[in-house]
Image (spheres, rainbow, N blue to C red):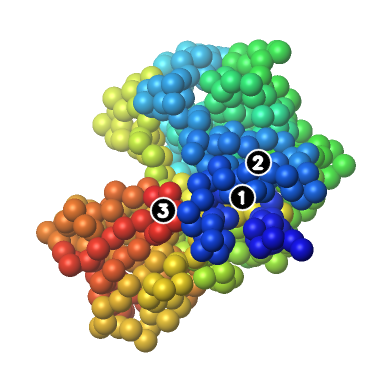
Amino acid sequence: MESRLITAVKNLAAKRAVFRLSELLPRLDDSYLDLSQEEVLADIQPHLTSLRLKAVRSEDDYIFSPTGQSPVIAPGEPETGPQAAFFAGRRIPALIERSIEEYITRKASKNWDDPETLARLKKAIVAQKDDYWRPAYQRRLRYAKGYSVLGYLAYHFPVYFMQAEHLLAMLAREGLLKPSANILDVGTGPGVVPLAIADFYSRLDNRKATVYSLERSEEHIEAFLFLRKQCTTKGAKVSVKAPIAMDITSPDLAKVPGKIDLMIFSNVLNELPGDSPDAGAGIVAALAGRLAPDGTVLITEPADEENAMRMRSLTVALLGHGFTIYGPCAFLWGTRCEAPRCWSFTSARPILPTHIMEVMRQDPEGFRYVNTDIKYSYAILRKDGLTRQECRPPADAKFLRLSKISQHVGKRINVAAAKMSGELGNPRSHVIKLCDGTAKAPIYAVMPGYHRTDENELIVKAPYGSLLELRGVLVRFNKAHNAYNLLVSRNTIVTGLEDTEV
Ligand SMILES: C[S@@+](CC[C@H](N)C(=O)[O-])C[C@H]1O[C@@H](n2cnc3c(N)ncnc32)[C@H](O)[C@@H]1O
């Protein structure tokens, strides 16, 4: 008869394509309590072939994945050594910065720092920003004129490039970058993401990628081809292919390469016409027909309230197209998300201004041309059911599901939830978004600065996406925002949720 251990492995493997030994252990009965990880693994090992699984050591854990699946980068690997040095520098590579200056000079037929060129760049930047804040159906931005793309290169490119590098580091930590990957960047603009991939992989060992991209603007394609020539080398770890001209609202799927391991939509879905998340979801789903079965879709959008919330609704619409959400959301009670007015985003250290920004900031209104903050919303989706972390609050723990919060206003409760924002308040009054996957209205942890203690400051210090336990928070209804606040006081204890890596 099959042992209970092997049944537990089979059950977990049926739910998750890739899982860790540390996730299996809590599912085993008490007879395994005294065994080390290695002893449990030794019992599983003889069955791996028949289970069609392999186990690979990863730091102090083991990752199980189907045989035949490409191996993944061990979590934690990329942000040491050269990667760490790169992120600490907070600058886009000097070669890319110089190439952008050179491209502006060429297209303007005058030096990029000529007063006339600068004046036109500034005008293009302001026009782009004004357009961005119009409702989607009123936007005019088509990147059809040279200066709109030059403005993009001067103002948006550096931050979006660095943002892409942070997202790649996150994917690598999660084990979602295959050593040999086919990547498709949709709405690539001047090649921000492909160039970031080439740069990121240049600091990884034994990894390579082929990067394809789709773009409809000829001006962007021209800029991309120039930067590709200047900043990438043939035979390098990353082969950056020329962008494929395409309008993704009517995609020609025959032209889109198949077996894509990673499909990226970076700051493009908010530019699609129409307000309904279903339209965007339909386009993502159609293109995802070209995804490998164990492929990943990464969507990232600006962090402002409107775009971040639209992206989250679009993500939920994708659940109806056979996707599951891998992260950053956590579904602690195994329920389906409704994304109630979900304004969730993360941030990274600002970049240092580029040379062009330094020159433009000499203007009396110089602040308008300097863009250094990195704040973004993102979602990772899969079609094979893989999720970031499967964690259930311990069975004996008394945590309130956030869906039931309206019945507990004025009471002190315990909750288990993921930290779904950075600081939304300030040091005098911390505000942090929380979610356990069941919330029907926005939920915020609110902590007056003077209530901060060693026992509760994890709410501020934990990284975005961390799973937390909050014991002893007071529930308040915030009428102005139709939201609930969980008041964290000096008596509240905040810890990492058991069995997670907070
Ligand atoms: C804000 S830019 C983002 C560029 C790049 N992905 C980044 O993150 O910096 C949006 C890009 O999407 C492209 N785009 C918008 N709608 C598109 C469509 N229907 N088909 C193809 N590309 C589109 C635009 O031309 C532009 O290059």
Which residue appears farthest toward the right when viewing the image?
A: 254
| Quadrant of the rendered image containing residue 244 | top right
What's the residue type where badge 3 is placed?
Answer: Ser
Which residue matches tag 1?
Answer: 19
Relative side of 14 to 456, left or right: right
Q: Quadrant of the N terminus?
A: bottom right
- Comparing marks 1 and 3, which lies closer to the viewer? 1
Q: Which kind of residue does numbered mark 1 sit on?
A: Phe
Q: Are marks 3 and 2 in contact (CB under 8 Å)?
A: no
Percent from the top left, x then y, of residue 347? 39, 44
Residue at the image point whose x is 63% and y is 37% from the top:
56
Residue 409: image quadrant is: bottom left
Residue identified by numbered label 2:
55
Say which label, 3 or 2, has the lower sequence index: 2
Report which residue position mark 3 lands on: 466
Name the residue rendered at 76%, 41% in the picture.
Answer: 67
**Which numbered disc flags the more N-terminal residue, 1 or 2?**
1
Nearer to me, 349 or 486: 486
* Neighbour tally class for label 2: few under 14, some 14-19, many 20 plus, Cα within 10 Å: many
**C-alpha distance separating marks 1 and 3:** 18 Å
Q: Mark 1: give few (<14), some (14-19) or many (20+) Cα within 10 Å.
A: many
Please identify the residue farthest to the left as the structure is shown: 450
SS of the residue under disc 3: loop
- Residue at x 42%, y 16% (from the top left corner): 114
Q: Position of residue 331 (x, y in %)?
A: 53, 64
Quarter of image, res 207:
top right
Task: Tell me how far mark 1 sits from mark 2, CA to CA.
Answer: 10 Å
Specify the amino acid type for callout 2: Ala
Q: Secondary structure at mark 1?
A: strand
